Amino acid sequence: MTAAAPARTTPRFEPALMRRKLTGTIFYGACVAAVGVLLLTLVALLVDVFIRAAPWLDVGFLTGVPSSRPARAGILPALVGSLEIGVIVGLVTFPLGVAAAIYLVEYAADSRLNRLLQTNISNLAGVPSIVYGILGLAVFVRTLALGRSILAAALTLSLLILPVVIIASVEALKAVPHAQREGAYALGASRWQMVRRNVLPAAAPGIMTGIILAMARAIGEAAPLILIGAFAFVTFLPNPLAGQYTVVPIQIFDWARRPQDDFQGISAAAIVVILGLMLVLNGLALVVRARLSRHIQW
Amino acid sequence: MQAPIAEARPREPVGVTIKPTMTLAPETAVEREPVLRLDAVSCWYGTFRAVKDVSIYIKAREVTALIGPSGCGKTTLLRTMNRMNDLIPGYRTEGHVNFEGEDLYGQGVDPVAVRRRIGMVFQKPNPFPKSVYDNVAFGPRINGFKGDLDELVEHSLRRAALWNEVKDKLKQSGMALSGGQQQRLCIARTIAVEPEVILMDEPCSALDPRSTLQIEELMAELKRDYTIVIVTHNMQQAARASDKTVFLTMGDDRAGYVVEVDDTVKIFTNPREQLTEDYISGRFG
C-alpha cells in the first residue's frame, strides 16, 4: 500500500499577482522615462542649435568661404573637405573591414588565436582617437610622405573606425544561422558561393548599420585631425590628394572659440550643416543596404 | 588514376526521365549495383569515436532507413555519405566510402562536387530567405546550369509535390510557407541539381502528421529515380517508407555500431537480433 499523500495544510503557491503586476508597471514606467530623458535632451539641443543658427543659415553660408567678418563667413571648404574624407574613408573601410570580418568568421579556424585577434580588435575600438592621430602623423604624414593632406586624414580616420566596422561585421556574419550555410553546401556550393550568395546578403543589414555608425564617428572627429595638420582657415576647395584642407568639426571648433557673439551663431549654423551631412550619408547607407539585401525575403 | 568524381556519366535531360520500374516485380528485378558501399567506416570527432566499424551498402532506387536510439551516430553516418562532416573542425573518417566505384574520400575528390551528386535534406526545414523560385534555382545557378531555368524550377517543384500550392507565389519568400511546404521546397531545391542520392536527416521530425505523410508519399514516388537514405526516430515511418533498414545502437564506449541490416519487412517482423527486437518493440531506446 502506498503512503497517504501529505495533508495540504499550507498553501504551496503565493501568486502575489498584484505585486508582480506592480513590478511590471514600474519597469514599463522606467523604460518610458529613459526614452523621455533622451528625447528631451536631444530636442533641447536641436532647438537651441537651430535657434542660434537660423539667422546665419542661407545659401551664402553654404557656398561661401571662411572670413574674419562673420556676415561673409561660409562653410563650403570645410563641407567639401568632410565629404571628400567621408568618401575615401568609406571606400577604404567598407572592403577592408568586411573582408577582414569574412576571413575571421568564414575562413579562419575558430582557434584561440582567432579569438585573441577578435578581442584585440575590440580593444582597438576603445583606443582614444588622439592616439590614432599620433599614428597617422608618424605613418601617413611622415613615413609615407602624404603630408598634411586629405588623403592622410582619411587614412588615419579609416584606421580609427576599422575596428568598429570589423566587429560589427563579425557579429552580423555570426548571426546568420548555420543551417543556411549547410543548405548551400548541400547543393554543391563552394565556400565563396555560399558566402557571396547566402551569408553576405543575410548579414548586409547588420554590416551596414555598423558602417553607418562608424562613418558618423569618422566625420564627427576633430581631435586626430588637429594632430595631423588640418587647418582651421581654408578659403579654397581642398584637393583630396595634397594640400591644405579643413573639415566641418574643426571649423566648428575654430568658430566656437572666438570671442565674438556672431561667430557663436555661425558655429551653430555649421553644426546644423554637419547634422545634415550625417543625414545624407545615413540615407545613402540605407539605399546601399536595401540594394544589398533586395533579394532577401525573411 | 580514377576519373575525377565531377565528371559524372551524362544525365538525361529534365522532364524525360520515365523509368518503367513499376513493371518489374521485386523478385524478378535485376539485382542492382549498390550506389554507396561503406567499408569499415569509423567516424571520429577529435579523439571521440562516434561511429565504429560500419560496413553497409545502399542500393540504387531504394529507401534505406537508419534507425537507432539517440546519440548512436545515425546522423554522423549519414553526413559522412556526402562529406558534410568535413565542415566540422576535428572530424575525420576512417575506412572507405565507395560511391559508384570510387572512393568518396580519395585524393583529389572535391567535396563540393560530391555534394551536388549526393544531396541532403535537413531535420529542420532551412529554405533560404529568398523567393520560392530563387530557392529552387539556387543550386542550378551555382552549378552553371545551361538551359531553361523556368522549366527546371517547375519540374523540380512538381516532383516535390509542391507546384500546385506555390505556382501563384513563386516570387514570395520561401520562409513564408508552412513547415511542411518548406520541407518540400527543400526537397525540390535538392532535386533541382539532379543528384543521384538524397540523404534525409529526420526530415519529418519538425512536421505535423499530415505533412509527414506527404513527405513519405513523396519519398515513395522519388525512389523511382533517386536513391534515398533516411535517418528517422519514428519507427512507424521506417516501417512504412523504407525498403531496407539499418539498425544501429551504441556500445559501452558510446560509439555507434550496426546491429542488423535487412529488408525492412524482415527487421520489423522477424529480426535476427534480440537488441533489434527490443528496440522496435519499444523496450529500450
Image: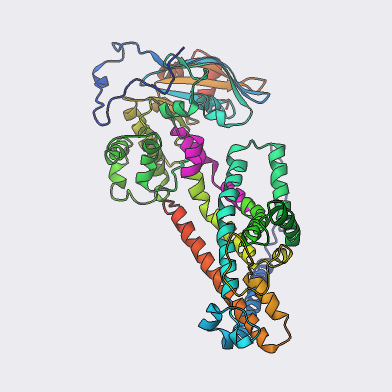
Residue range in magenta is A168-197
- Residue A34 visible? The answer is no
Location of the N terminus of chain A by quadrant is: top right
Compared to A254, does B163 lie above or below? above
Looking at the image, residue A143 sits to the left or right of residue A269; the answer is: right
B49 in magenta = no
Position in image of residue B50 (x %, y %) = 61, 24
> Nearest the camera: B73 or A64?
A64
Position in image of residue B204 (x %, y %) = 44, 36
When asked about the image quadrant of residue B256, the answer is top right
Looking at the image, residue B265 sits to the left or right of residue A162; the answer is: left
**At 65% across and 66% down in the image, what residue appears?**
A17
- Residue B120 visible? The answer is yes
Looking at the image, residue A258 sits to the left or right of residue A95; the answer is: right
When asked about the image quadrant of residue A215, the answer is bottom right
Position in image of residue B93 (x %, y %) = 58, 21
Characterize the magenta stretch by its predominant secondary structure.
helix
Compared to A30, does A264 lie above or below? below
> Nearest the camera: B52 or A72?
A72
Position in image of residue A173 (x %, y %) = 57, 47
A191 in magenta = yes
Compared to A58, does B234 lie above or below? above
Marks counted in the figure total 0
**At 59% across and 53% down in the image, what residue appears?**
A93
Looking at the image, residue B158 sits to the left or right of residue B186; the answer is: left
